[in-house]
Every structure is written in C-alpha cells, then in structure tokens.
Amino acid sequence: MLDRTDRRILMILQEDGRIATIDLAERIGLSPTATSERLKRLTREGYVTGYGARLDPHKLGLGLMVFVEVSLDKTTPDIFERFAAAVRRAPEVLECHMVAGGFDYLVKTRVADMAAYRRFLGEVLLALPGVTETRTYAVMEEVKRDGPLPV
C-alpha cells in the first residue's frame, strides 16, 4: 500500500527521474537515508520500472508521428502471438496495443516524413503476420505528450 509520501516520491520522479536523493529528501521532508530506503522499496516492488531520457524526435529527423489501426485476418491466439512477436522485433514501432472495438491493434510510429511512412507501411506493417487492413492517422499537432500518471 502506498502512503502519501510514497505517492509524492513517485510524482516527483515522474517530473525529474535524475533528481538527487538529497534533493528528493528535502522536497518530501525526510532524511536522505529514509528517502533512499523508500526509493529502493518502490523500485523493488515494481512501482518504478526504470529511468530514461526523453529525446526530441524532430532533432532526430523523426518529425512525423502516425497512429495506425490494424485489423488481422483471424483473431486466434496463434495469430495474436505471431503478430505480437513480429511487432516486438520492429524498431520503427514505438507502441502497439491490442484493443477492443472495430480493429485489433493500435500502432504508434515515428518516421521522417510521409514517404518514410509509406515505406514503413509497405515493408514492415503490411508484412506482419495476419494483417489484412490498416487505417492511418497522421498527427498534425501533439497537444499533450508523456503525461505523468496520476498517483
């Protein structure tokens, strides 16, 4: 069970994953030792799953974000597993979610431009096991990105 201090630690870490333990301790009003122990426990119990840098996709030449609805020819455990395994091997796929509704998966990718997306669609996405239909949604503006979880 998370108490108020644990939740505060998690909120602060979402804002700044590189915060020094001493600075974190000061912000939550505990000693550095107590803060360190709480942080170790939160990590050990799986609340904190890792740390990473947020990169600017535009500076890396990946200015076009695209969401793609993917429909499969069959909805069987074997097809789901084959599709999921292939998606995990595709570095262009940033996120992939099995969804309930009118299609099977929602894929998120970032590419340089529409020509690069066309290549990705033809060479990667449509070649995945079981794919019969896709619908593409190119993002015109990111309104909110990487929002923190409400803890």
Image (cartoon, grey):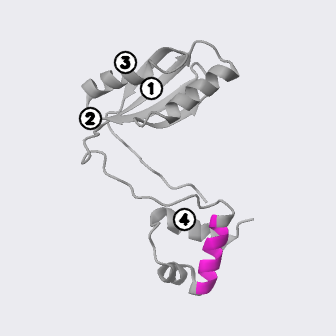
Element class at badge 4: helix
Labels 4, 1: front one: 1
Q: Is residue 40 magenta?
A: yes
Task: Decide if residue 30 is in sight here.
Answer: no
Residue nearer the viewer, 19 or 60: 60
User: Looking at the rendered structure, which numbered label has been put on residue 11?
Assistant: 4
Asked if the residues shown at circle 1 and circle 3 are in contact, with their CB atoms under 8 angstroms apart, the answer is no
Q: Position of residue 22 (x, y in %)?
A: 50, 83
Look at the picture and state if 69 lies above or below 16.
above
- Residue type at mark 3: give it: Gly
- Residue type at mark 4: give it: Met
- Which residue has dot 3 on it? 122
- Which residue has dot 1 on it? 68
Element class at badge 2: loop
Distance of mark 1 from mark 3, alpha carbons? 13 Å
Q: Which residues are magenta?
A: 33-43
Q: Position of residue 35 (x, y in %)?
A: 60, 80
Residue lying at the far right in this picture: please name it. 1
Distance of mark 4 from mark 3, alpha carbons? 41 Å
- Residue type at mark 1: give it: Val
Q: Is residue 148 left or right of residue 101?
A: left
Neighbor class of circle 2 (other Cα within 10 Å; few <14, some 14-19, many 20+) is some
Q: Earlier in the sequence, mark 2 or mark 4?
A: 4
Is the C terminus in the top left, top right, bottom left or bottom right quadrant? Answer: bottom right
Labels 2, 1: front one: 2
Neighbor class of circle 1 (other Cα within 10 Å; few <14, some 14-19, many 20+) is some
- Which residue has dot 2 on it? 112
Q: Earlier in the sequence, mark 3 or mark 2?
A: 2
Q: Is residue 117 left or right of residue 18?
A: left
Look at the picture and state if 17 lies above or below 110.
below
